[in-house]
Amino acid sequence: MRRHLHKYPETAHREKKTAQYLLDFLRQFNPDKLISGIGGHGIAAIYNGKNKGPAVLIRCELDGLPIKEESRADHRSVNEGTAHLCGHDGHMTMVAGLAPLLSVARPQSGSVILLFQPAEETGEGADRVLGDEKFRHIQPDYVFALHNLPGFPESSIITRKGVFASASKGLIIELEGASSHAGHPEGGNNPAVAAAQMVQSVLTIPQKHLAMHDAALITPIHLRVGQPAFGTSPGDGVVMFTVRAHSNASLETMETEILHQVKHIAKAHNLSYRSRWIEPFEAVVNDTGCVDVIEKCAGDLELQVVRQEIPFPWSEDFGVFTSKHKGALFGLGAGEKTPQLHNENYDFPDQLLEKGTMMFYSIIGELLNTESKD
């Protein structure tokens, strides 16, 4: 399954064939309810216990990345320019692996929801799922997810109470002046100097407007003025940033200040501009009790626990779930020599599959058994 999913990746909002493949698999294991088309191509397989109890949701992601893969493996992507270079193929497989277990041993109480979420990579999927009428009837009490993490010991469990992964947004600023002949730049309004000033000014914002403990990062990711035509002084430009912070509040502070700086610089250079924010990710904030459950289950399975001292700088849209429900995201070590996520040579390590499935299965058992005794 993992290698099949890797071979046929689909990007956000286009996961139709991936979803159908998983639906066909899940039907074999008789969930009490199988819902498709949630928030796009999302799927929920629900297994109910005999008695009333909490609903535990286990979530994974359907989408791949718009990146060319360099692997020569037999299961390398056949879809040019699209690849599972973040490990969502492995995450889906681990969650799907719960279906045959639950089909023969349903929980004694409560219910288990296996959620296959679309469009994680763009930061849109979780919000669309939670806003979908089909999901509103599910209402989980607990939510859990994992992400494989290269650079950590293989099969280790990485945890953190509180903020686990950072909030982030992308910003696109389009500048418009007036083009002219390169020999007469004074006849137009070239946005090059303004674009350079925006980069310099925006990069100082975390230092000027946040306290030392409010970690934040602004990364310029794209800068363009005009086209490569030596006879023309351009009249348009684009500046793009990724903005990250450990808290949603710090991110909002930077959003306000960035737009203030952009407006000031554009006005000073007599330029018009348009700005838009894209790919928003809330910070993933882990519930303390849920992290305790994760660590206990890791101990029961004799897996090493690594407690992360500071939040990760990357983002995950599971933060939308943890902002509304008790839950936690944890890491599964993918090996210290495994290529980093989103690298052209990354490939999910198959030896992690059983460990991930059993971590989820143990969490389900621990929570439902604990709750059923109360």
Image (cartoon, grey):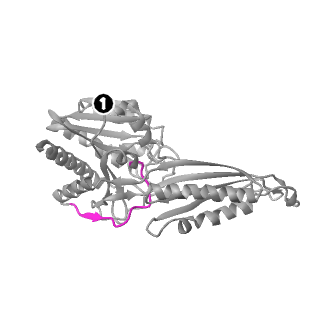
Residue lying at 23% horizontally and 34% vertically, measured from the top left: 47
Q: Quadrant of the C terminus?
A: top left
The number of callouts visible is 1
Please tell me whether the stretch drawn in magenta is mainly helix, strand or loop: loop
Could you tell whether 112 is left or right of 162 in the image? Answer: left
Residue span colored magenta: 303-318
Q: Position of residue 93 (x, y in %)?
A: 31, 45
Residue 284 vertical placement versus 52 (above, below): below
- Residue of label 1: 34
Task: State yes or no: residue 146 in magenta.
Answer: no
Instruction: Confirm whether the magenta stretch covers residue 309.
Output: yes
Of residue 265 and residue 29, the one placed in the foreground of this image is 265
User: Where's residue 98, x and y in %?
Assistant: 24, 42
Quarter residue 352 falls in: bottom left
Amino acid type at mark 1: Leu
Nearer-the-camera pick, 102 or 199: 199
Q: Is residue 105 visible?
A: no
Q: Which residue does the image show at 37% across and 58% down from the upper left?
A: 163
The reply to whether residue 283 is in sight is: yes
Where in the figure is residue 309, as x and y percent of width and height? 34, 67
Q: What residue lies at 43% left-to-right and 68% top-to-bottom?
A: 213
Q: Is residue 232 left or right of residue 163?
A: right
Identity of the residue drawn at 29% across and 39% down: 140
- Camera-side residue: 213 or 139? 213
Give the quadrant of residue 184.
bottom right
Classed neighbour count for the residue bearing mark 1: other residues with Cα under 10 Å, few (<14), some (14–19), many (≥20): some
